[in-house]
Image (cartoon, rainbow, N blue to C red):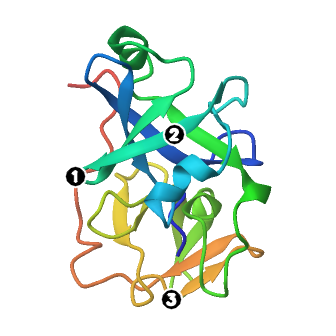
Amino acid sequence: MADPRSMNANDDLICVGLIGSARGLKGELRVKSFTADAKALGSYGALTDKNGERAFELKVTGKHKDQLVVRIKGVDDRNAAEALNGLELYMSRDQLPKTDEDEYYLSDLIGLDAELVDGTPFGQVVEADDYGGGPFLEVKAEGQAAVLVPFTKAAVPVVDIEGKKVVIDPPEGLLEPGDPEPQEGLG
């Protein structure tokens, strides 16, 4: 599975990084890369915001824990760097490599219908992410709380992008009855 994660309303852009906190006084930033090779983030050319309206030229200057340390052209002080905290960085899908068989960009999974191995409808994939503990799918059925499903071959044996569905073989205990989705105004 490829690392770039969520996509926005513009299907041609894929999120490849997330700007974190400022580092130092001269405008350096911490950036979480979602690319397979984290340091390659600086070699893709200008990245954009989710609307494709603002461009950011990154230069990787180092690494801090699991994040890159970068300089962004035009960001020369801590205040300017802090103003970018939380901004997602995107690039055009056509700049990314094609995926191999059984390899997917996580963004391609969002919106797919989910069904159980016996064909029972289960909901829809509303999020696909990897925060470091392994990728997962967040599946939501109407009126039910979301369920996090490990995105492994065992738990998700079928991914059919063209058919717009995934098949889930839930690990034991995953589908135990839980709390219903909270109702607005009740409390």
Label 1 is placed on what type of residue? Lys
Label drawn at residue 65: 1
Picture quadrant where residue 150 is located: bottom left
Percent coordinates x, y for residue 152 in the rendering: 41, 82
Percent coordinates x, y for residue 87 in the rendering: 48, 29
Label drawn at residue 59: 2
Residue that appears at 58% across and 76% down: 166
From what the image shows, is residue 111 above or below residue 163?
above
Which of 129/23 is in front? 23
Which of 92/186 is in front? 92
Percent coordinates x, y for residue 138 in the rendering: 42, 59
Circle nearer the N terminus (1, 2): 2
Residue that appears at 60% across and 66% down: 105
Left or right of residue 48: residue 136: left
Tell which residue pokes out farthest to the top in this image. 79
Label 3 is placed on what type of residue? Pro
Label drawn at residue 157: 3
